[in-house]
Amino acid sequence: MTISGVDEIQQALDQFVPETANKLMNNVVRALAVEFKEEIELRAPIHATLNLKRSIKVKKRRNEHNLPMFSVVFDSGKRAKHQGFYWRHVEHGTTKLAARPFVSPAIQKVNSELDSTITRIFSKKLTQTARKQFNKLKKKRKK
């Protein structure tokens, strides 16, 4: 029995595996950030304009180690569509406004469920990535 194409498969794996692993890690980290964002949105106090909820964004950040990094931020500034600068006043209170914490409880809830959340998201993203890679290989074979 002879197997032909092993070298081609090895070359494809050498190229796909690091790239796919990086994409998978990026997708998992982003999904975790989105989950955290959604938890904050659920707990955010509702104001008439909904600006606070609408200002919560997930942004990709750069870092020196070239690892995926996303932040959950409250958008504010000149270019922001919805201003959320006042989230600190709502979270911690002011001299005239009582504190209504919504970020701290969200952090606590996400941290308490972190292991199961990572496992769930990783398995979901791994399945999606494997399916995409399989479909790509099927298309290449047909050509």
Image: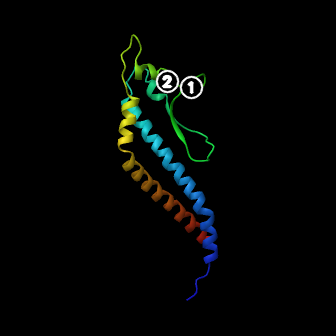
Q: Which residue is mark 2?
A: 84
Q: Residue 48 at what x, y percent from top left?
A: 40, 19
How many residues crowd around disc 1 within 10 Å: few (fewer than 14), some, or many (20 or more)? Answer: few
Q: Residue 101 at what x, y percent from top left?
A: 37, 25
Above/below status of 51 relative to 113: above
Would you say 90 lies left or right of 27 here?
left
What type is the residue that disc 1 sits on?
Answer: Ala
Q: Residue at x 35, y 42 (%)?
A: 112
Furthest residue in direction front, as rendered: 65
Q: Residue at x 46, y 40 (%)?
A: 34
| Cα gap from disc 1 to disc 2, whole angstroms | 9 Å
Above/below status of 116 relative to 138: above
What type is the residue that disc 2 sits on?
Answer: Gly
Above/below status of 71 relative to 131: above
Question: Residue 104, located in which quarter of the rendered image?
Answer: top left
Q: Nearer the viewer, residue 48 or 106?
A: 106
Q: Residue at x 41, y 21 (%)?
A: 92
Q: Residue at x 40, y 11 (%)?
A: 95
Contact, CB < 8 Å: mark 1 with mark 2?
Answer: yes
Q: Nearer the viewer, residue 72 or 135?
A: 72
Q: Which secondary structure, mark 2?
A: loop
Q: Which mark is residue 80?
A: 1
